[in-house]
Image: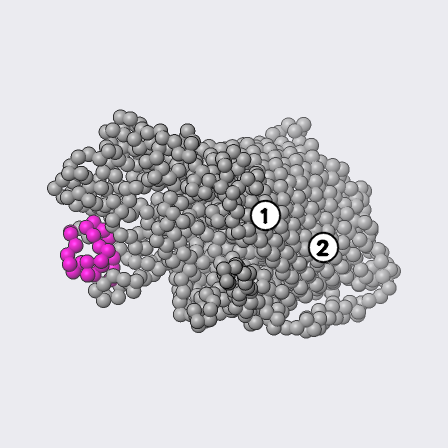
Amino acid sequence: MSPSTSARICGALLGFLLAGATAGAQAPTGRITGVVTDSASTQPLAGVHVTVGVGTGAITREDGRYSISALAAGTYTVRVARVGYTAASRTVRLGDGETATADFALAHNAVVLSDVVSVGYGEKTRANVTEAIASVPADQALKTATTTIEQGLQGRVAGVNVTTGDAAPGGGMRVQIRGVNSVNSGSNQPLYVIDGVPVASSDVSRSNFNTGVASALTETNPLSTLSPSDIESIDILKDASATAIYGSRGANGVVLITTKKSRAQQGGMLSLDVSQGWTSVTKQIRVLTAPEFARYTNLSWAQGYGTPASGLPYGGRPGSWSPERIQASIGNGVNWEDEIFRTAPIQNATLSASGRDPNGSYMVSGNILNEQGVINGSSFRRGGIRANLDRALNDRFRFQSNLTLTRSINDMVRTSTIGATAWRDLGIVRQALAYVPMRHLNGDTTTVAGDSRAVDAETWAAFGADPRRYTDEVSENDAITRGLGNFKVTTQLPWNFALDMSVGGNYERRGYGSYYPRTVQEGYSANGVAIAAGSEFYNILNDDLLRWNRTFGAQHVDAVGGFSYENSRSTWESNTVSGFANDYLGNNVLNLASKVSTPYSGVGAWKLASFLGRVNYSLLDRYLLTGTVRQDGSSKFAANNKWATFYSGAFAWRMLQEPFFRGGNTLGFNDVKLRLSAGQSGNQAIGAYQSLGALEGGTFPINEVMVPIFYVARLANPNLKWETTTQYDAGIDLTAWDSRINATVDVYRKITNDLLQNITVAPNTGFSRATINSGSVTNRGIELSTDVTPVQLANSFTWTVGANASRNINRLESLGPTARQFAGEIPTAGGGPAVVPFIQQPGLPLGSIWGYVVQGIQKTYPTHADTLRDPSISYGSYVYKDINGDGKIDSNDQTLIGYAFPKWTYGFNNSVSWKGLDASMLVTGVVGGSVINVERFRYLQMNMRQNIPKYYVDRAWNDTTNPNGKFQRIDNGRVKMRFSDQILESGTYMRLKNIQVGYKLPWAQLNGTRVYFNAVNPLTFTHYTGFDPEVSAYSSAATPNVDQGNYPNAKIYTIGASTNF
């Protein structure tokens, strides 16, 4: 759709808004006045927001009185709201030049915020919501959100699957709302909106830095720069009616985050929250001790090279690593897990000052976090300040601002094998499991590179640097400065109109530095490698919205329409140098290096212009309708496809409001609401300029002179356009027993068309890949949630229980011209054979895993027929199933062996309070889903050069000592491994996610001081043999549930206190 068409749409919307008011438009001379009091004390309440139509018409003074003037004749709904009190409303009829009175007595309600839901560019009361929206109370989310707010969503919302992307301090979570919509690697995360400002889950990827060894390291989560203690509310938009207002950015759901405002009733208040905690790994893996490793090595050598008669290497003579010699000289050796893991401290402190007067409120807060990681050398430190201001300038104008500034420093250790170039490049966790459990093989302390702490030459040659080298001597850090802000002016206009004009932005400056000394593999031959990289990102947003709110008897209309504009730009650069005289200065003086690698830099910019509108209509407070339209124009797409329009509609019926139910038997139900919605939203999550051809530069020798050249590096696609997701939703909301029972059930179906794909193209084109629109994916599912208050005794005892569960079924419907394709190249170990296990084929779900099926163990020496069937077979190796029955084992015998995504996700919470004492717990878990444990590929080859868990050695097949063994024979790594179902493990688990116990001290002098104990991840129940089944080595939804030596999850125990002054 063209911009001229969008202008017509916007004009039609404004015309509709104006038309609704012309019938009653008269000279604005009327006035509404009143007084607001506390229903319990009858004392006047100051600082109450009073709304007539749209926005804040007035704020009550110290005597509780308010006055809103210059109103046209008509019927108005007067709404009042204040934090800590139940919102109320009254309908008044105002004649020309008359004064109407509306007084209110508000009752205390500590959970009033849960009755108001953010819906994107507005708010609704829970009773009038027509969309699928879930809310998470901030105080509940804070119990598990130690570093970043996504941690607090896990297990609390049906249909929202939250998994650990990287458990390192400051690492991010993977959030999926109602399944995976796209095969595009970076386009399945939801949109986060903080105080009206969109924040991408990854603004500048470190992959842009081209930093060699550093490119494999952990991405820092941008949301980690926002302190969870600053959050007031979290609302999650799930269906199309809710997300369509965000158009091209809403296909994967939207998470609306609102920061805290002043809670002071009158005057000022200081609040302090401090905590001290300790973290440790949830489990350790029992690997072989030094004598066990020697015995394993000798057995591996004997069974690999010895004869059945001797069974020992070198004609029956014990190897130089005899268990007896090792036991005598070094005992059990070194447990490298103990060397790299630690019990680490975590401290957090938040101080805030807030205040309120009759014309507004303010809040200023500061936060400091110091989290030391469970792996030596890792940490995350953050400091930030935030200021929120809400001010009524007069009866017509209201000013609001939200500003946040943070600085974080992330010290990292390498835990990934991505980009590995040698078998030793395992990442620190995998290296701790694989490294020989001794520091010196022969008691020799010969130094390497003049370092007195270096291992002996024999150990270095065989195994490289030990794990402590990487934790203690490699330096890597990421420093981020981020600013986030929004300024808004609301103007009350005649005839129930209001104009919101806002400007906001998001700024990030990032500096990355690392140094690999010559005492580790990466820096040894290069005489030290230093890397310095940086990036800068900004996003500027302008929203101009016209609102209209009017009641006509039993009808109520709430409408908004306007324009939105975003401008984003990012730049990055990186430099890698090597060849230092020594390692003393690290990467602080790059000009001391003797070798400079090719520097890299880049820039990306994109813009988004949007027209939007939404109308909410209520008839008799019983029939509710919502209609939404948004038109987006993005610079990312081709000239003919820059604009797209997204529509949605929703209907809800509050059936107990019908006359035939009133006064009758409703079986204890207070409210029953049926909801239906349908609509579209889009996805533009690709890089800038993808529709354009690209040139790259280089040099080429001509007449023995290197001449600069340019060549076409990427095909242009003039037809590139949006992915579009169409979603249908049906739901029911139930409230019973005086709101002590609440339940919601939703079923949905989503279809995503025109998938954005980076496909392989024919070699004769001269290119390897191109970005196109092709294919479709469907998701369908069910979501169940309930919360119950079985016991509620006034001022005494309360018990609440909540539960949620969801099931999503994904199916790839089409790949366009491609019959099938594979995704996710995974190195099985540094320098080892890579596998591409994820198949994308119509009819199968995304996350389907492709490989061989193991039938059993080859328990006799292979015959000639056996070797013809499978040339890799050996005595004691796996026997693979001949799927196609052609009598030979090859790639045609691979089949579907598992699904990565779970069948069900669930959460269960329980809380009790008695007088000043409170306690709560949260249980989360998943049922189904396979985890690719990449380490099993190494374990099951039984390679004597690397240590392995005792679990596998004890269960290895042996014709005499263990004839019922389930794993391959110990055979010096000569048994060949194919990617098979043996690499997969069940991802099912149940986790006691959180326990918190608190006590509010009864002394009035301490003003509500509360002390508490909090535990995160104290218990996990699973059959998974790795560190944790909740794992995701890759950010792409195309390669889920891969355990590749990830940073392990931690148990966190905290004590803290909060108070007000």
Lateral position of residue 81 relative to residue 171, left or right: right
Label located before the other in sequence (1 or 2): 2
Q: Measure how far apart labels 1 and 2 are at the Cα level.
A: 27 Å
The residue shown at (29%, 52%) is 977
Q: Residue furthest left?
A: 309
Kind of residue sitting beneath label 1: Gly
The reply to whether residue 792 is in sight is: no
Q: Residue at x 74, y 57 (%)?
A: 501
- Which residue occupies the foreground of this view, 653 or 185? 185
Magenta stretch in the rendered image: 860-882
Residue 567 position within the rendered picture, expressed as x and y whole percent measured from the top left: 66, 58
Residue 493 falls in which quadrant of the image? bottom right
Magenta residue check for 872? yes
Count numbered badges in the picture: 2
Residue toward you, 324 or 533: 533
Q: Nearer the viewer, residue 811 or 43?
A: 811
Q: Which residue is mark 1?
A: 534
Position above or below: 410 against 158: above
Q: Is residue 412 magenta?
A: no
SS state under label 2: strand
Task: Report the residue at 76% width, 55% height from top.
Answer: 490
Label 1 element class: strand
In the image, taking residue 624 as reference, residue 392 lies left or right, namely right
Label of residue 503 in the image: 2
Q: What is the crowding at mark 1: few (fewer than 14 residues within 10 Å), some, or many (at least 20)?
A: many
* 558 with respect to 596 (left or right): right
